[in-house]
Amino acid sequence: MPHQTIVTHALSNGMTLVVEPMNDVRSAAFSLLVPSGGNYDPDGQCGSAAVLCDLLTRGAGDLDSKQLSAALDNLGVQRGESVGNSFITFTVAALADNLPAALRLYGDVVRRPRIPEDQFSAARAGVEQMLRALEDEPRQKVIQELRRHCYDLPWGRPSDGELSDLPALSAESVHAHFDRCFRPNGTILGVAGRIDADEVIQLAEDIFGDWDEKPDPPVSSGPRAGRFKHIDHDSTQTHIGIAYEAIPYSDPDYYAAWAAISVLSGGMSSRLFTEVREKRGLCYAISASLNSLKDEARVLCYAGTTAERAQETLDITLQELLRLGDGIGDDELNRCKARAKSSLVMQQESTLARSSAGARDWYHLGRVTTLDEIIAKIDALNVDAVLDYVRRHPAGDFTILTIGPQPLEVPGDLS
C-alpha cells in the first residue's frame, strides 16, 4: 500500500482536525462529527437530534434551503447527514478543487443554520414516516430493540427517535437542542484526498477557529431494559436478535475479537451460515457483528426464519456461539484475514472511507491507525490468540429479543 501521511491538528477551541493527503486520487472528502446525537435528547423528547439533523441543511448563513442545495449541487458534491448516539455526522465527497467551498458551506451549516420554524412540521413528519416504516421492517426493528435491551440508557436508545415522543417536540425545543449541543469542543473533522495538509489546517482555522466553546451538555443515564423480550407480530416469520458482551475498539485485543466474530459470520463459509442455514436449512438470513461504543461493546446476532423453525434456529445458533471456544481451524482464520485485507485495499481507494476512518479512530483511540498498522495486527493473528480471547470472553449472559407470532423458550441454563 502507498505510504500514508496523517496529520492531526487541535484548534484552540477544542475541535480536532485529522488530515490524510492521498496524492494518487483526484477527489477529496470530509467527515464532520458534531457531538450532538441521540444521547443528548432530553427525556421524553427522543427524536430531537433526528429532527434537528433534517433541519440543519434547510438553509444556513445567507442561503435559504433552495439556495444551499443549489450551491452544493453546483459543486458536484456527494453528501449525507446522519444521526447516531454520540454525533450528528456530515459527509461530503467532491473533486479536490471544490472541497474548500463545500467545507465553507458546512461551516455555516454547523455554526449558522437557519433551522426554519415553518419547515419544522415537515422535518418531524419525515422522521415519523421513517419510524413507521421501521415498524414494517422487523429485521431492522429487532436489532434496534436488541440494542435497547443490551445497553444502558442512553446508549441503547434509538437515535432515530421514538414515535411516542415526537408529539412533545417543537421548533423551539429542537432549536434548543442545537443551542445546547453544537460546539467545537469534541467536534472532529476528518479530511482525506488530493489536498495539502497545511492548506486544510489553515482553511479549518479560518472557518472554525473563532467558534466559541460551550460546556458539555449533561446526558441522562438509566438502566437497560430486561434481558429477554418478545414482541408480538402477526406473521409467518420470526426475527431473532441475540447479544452478548465483547470488547471495544480501543481494547488491545480488539482484532482477536474481530477475528472471532468473523469466523462466526464473515461470508458464505462462516460458521453461522454453514451450520445454521446451509446444513440445516433453518433460516433465510443469519449474521453476527461486533458493535463497539467508546467504552463497551456487544456482539449483535440476527436470524430470520419461519415461525415453525424459530425455536430450533434459536437453539442451534446459541450452540454455535457457545462452541466457538472448542476450536478454530487455520483455514477459517486465513479466510477472515484475506477478506479483511481485501476490504482495506478498497478502503485505501476511497477518500470518504479514509476521512471517516480518521475521525472514528480519533474518537475511539485519540490517535489514527495507519492501514499498514492494521495489516500488521491482522497478520499477527493466529488461532491460539483468537481462542485465548474467546475463552477469556466467552459467549454468555445473552440478551435475546424476538419478533414474531409467538415467544420462544430460552434454554434454562442460559436464563
Image (tube, helix red, strand yellow):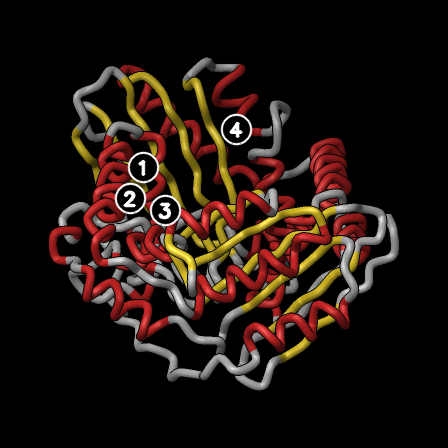
Q: Which residue is drawn at 39% across and 71% down?
A: 182
Would you identify the image quadrant in which residue 345 lies? top right
Q: What quarter of the picture does the C terminus occupy?
A: top left
Q: CA separation, marks 2 and 1?
A: 5 Å
Q: Is mark 3 on a helix, strand or loop?
A: loop
Q: Name the residue under label 2.
A: 145
Q: Is there CB contact under 8 Å for labels 2 and 1?
A: yes
The one nearer the camera, 366 or 94, is 94
Does 33 sit above or below residue 187? above
Amino acid type of the residue that numbered disc 3 sits on in the rendered structure: Phe
Q: Is there CB contact under 8 Å for labels 2 and 3?
A: no
Nearer the N terminus, badge 3 or badge 4? 4
Q: Mark 4 points at which residue?
A: 272
Amino acid type of the residue that numbered disc 1 sits on in the rendered structure: Val
Nearer the N terminus, badge 4 or badge 2? 2
Q: Name the residue under label 1.
A: 142
Q: Residue at x 30, y 77 (%)?
A: 218
Q: Is mark 1 on a helix, strand or loop?
A: helix
Residue 168 position, x and y percent, is 12, 57
Crowdedness near tag 2: few (<14), some (14–19) or many (≥20) residues, C-alpha within 10 Å: many
